[in-house]
Image (cartoon, grey):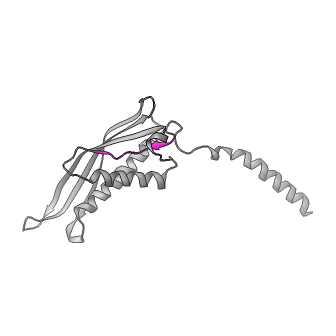
Amino acid sequence: MRLPFLTRFLTLLLAATGSWSCATSPLHRKEIGRMALPVLENFSWRRGWEFSLTRALARKIRVHSRIPLALEPDCDTVLLGAIRNITVSVAREDQGDRVTAANVTVTVDIRLVRRVSGKVLLARPGLSATGNYHAERGGRQETALREAFDQIAETILEELESPDW
């Protein structure tokens, strides 16, 4: 009695695995292939932040996507980017003119380029994200920048995985 049930179960299991074969295909766009991520350029008045943003973007890609990162000689595409501007806007000051709350906005341009042909696959100028901090809660401007970097890295990853381009 148990043998026919086991046979039917195994038959259904084998039939079902054929329908799941699409899961073995890559979950990222095939046009991207292996992608290089060189350090972003920085045209803002802040020096050194291009390294932090590049690290945040690489971490986001490794953890939240299946796009394989590679060194430039071994890659199919290159993600080029530039920090255009980092703006700090004061939201609130205390009576001694000390900043107690502020917003930090980061604006970047990105381009995804085929390494061999130089063809631009994706260009998104003016992507921006904002982080904020409150000094009375122990926040600092660097914390707001990291928050903005995480948000812009998420936006860039969404652009890379978007079916719209």
- Most foreground residue, 58 or 28: 58
- Most foreground residue, 18 or 122: 122
Q: Position of residue 153 (x, y in %)?
A: 37, 50
Image quarter for residue 112? top left
Q: Position of residue 88 (x, y in %)?
A: 19, 54
Quarter of the image that includes the N terminus: bottom right
Q: Residue at x 27, y 49 (%)?
A: 106
Quarter of the image that includes the C terminus: top left
Image quarter for residue 84? top left
Q: Position of residue 34 (x, y in %)?
A: 50, 42
**Secondary structure, magenta segment, majority class:** loop
Q: Residue at x 25, y 51 (%)?
A: 105
- Most foreground residue, 7 or 25: 25
Residue 132 vs residue 62: left or right? left
Residue furthest toward the front?
Answer: 73
Q: Residue at x 68, y 47 (%)?
A: 20
User: How many dots with numbers?
Assistant: 0
Residue furthest toward the bottom?
Answer: 137
- Extent of the magenta region: 33-41
Q: Position of residue 76 (x, y in %)?
A: 49, 37
Q: Is residue 94 above or below residue 154?
A: below
Q: Residue at x 47, y 53 (%)?
A: 62
Magenta segment: does it hold 137? no
Image quarter for residue 72? top left
